[in-house]
Image (cartoon, helix red, strand yellow):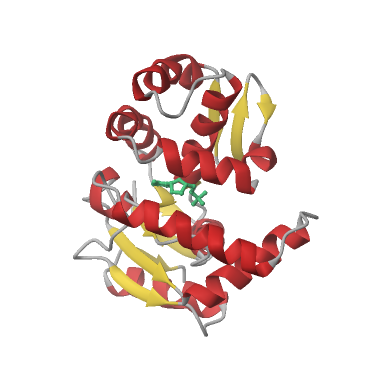
Amino acid sequence: MSVGMSWLVSKGLRIAIDGPSGSGKGTIAQLIGEELALPVLDTGLLYRYLGWRVAEEGVSLDDEKAVLQVIPAAINAMDWRAEGIFFAQNDCTSLLRSEDAGSLASKVAAMPDVRAALLDVQREIAKLGCVMDGRDIGTVVLPDAEGKFFLTASQRERSRRRWSQLKTKGEDVDLEQVSDELQARDARDMERDCAPLEKAVDAIRIDSTTMRMDDVVERILNVLERRKLITKKA
Ligand code: DC
């Protein structure tokens, strides 16, 4: 057992949180990670990073072989920490959160060989216990994770959340445009052949459309507690 703020956490506990853009999985993963003192790993950031490196190297996204060749050097230069991704010692996390980086990410993420090449990186870093969020964590990356959750929310609510996030960051975007991009990205993520976004059969589905984030966190903690993966400190 390791020790969180109010919880004893079983050693090496891995919690997989999957869901579409705007489902709240990033926020929930952060909150659970803080509560249980576990590192939080956002795998979307890894695909965003790779999409960005591919663009920076001037490689065409139509050329999967060339994209694959970018990976070894990109991984070498990367430091993936709980607070984000660093490239050559520089924190590039906020740059990777842009809509452009998201769109590049979803294109490289549709390439089967790219996904295969990133599997070990993700499994290695998850080994000591973590909260990992993405699209295929419960199905492919960590199918044996001790806790698996699938977050959803209505398309309208997800667009609104994404729009509000971008506005807060000072990006000049309109809701219609965000909604169209979100739908296009969802379609790409769900319809691709390799590791599409889907709920693992043994994951617990939580629809957060009308829930407060705190209530979602509470529901997840309850499940983990019932399964004796975490125990309240006396
Ligand atoms: O969660 P996000 O918006 O940062 O993810 C960016 C893109 O990466 C998204 O279009 C889907 C893709 N992705 C994926 O295919 N598999 C993951 N485990 C995480 C993200």
Residue 113 position in % (x across, y down): 28, 29
Residue 111 horizontal side relative to residue 85, left or right = left
Question: Would you say 205 lies left or right of 8 here?
Answer: left
Between 106 and 122, the one nearer to me in the picture: 106
130 or 150: nearer the viewer: 150
Find residue 87 and report its horizontal and vertical position in percent: 61, 24
Badge count: 0
Q: Look at the image and tell me whether residue 1 can be seen.
A: no
Please tell me which residue lies in front, 16 or 62.
Answer: 62
Residue sitting at 34 percent across and 65 percent down?
149
Residue 6 in the image: state x and y as whole percent. Answer: 52, 66
Residue 181 image position (x, y, % from top left): 55, 57
Residue 63 seen from this side: yes
Going 46% across and 75% down the picture, which residue do you hit?
A: 153
Q: Quadrant of residue 161?
A: bottom right
Q: Residue furthest bottom?
A: 210
What residue occupies the far right of the structure in this picture? 170
In the picture, measured across the screen, residue 108 lies left or right of residue 115, that is right
Report the residue at 53% width, 64% height from top.
22
Placement of 112 over or under 170, stated as above or below = above
Furthest toward the left, the residue is 201
The residue shown at (31%, 61%) is: 148
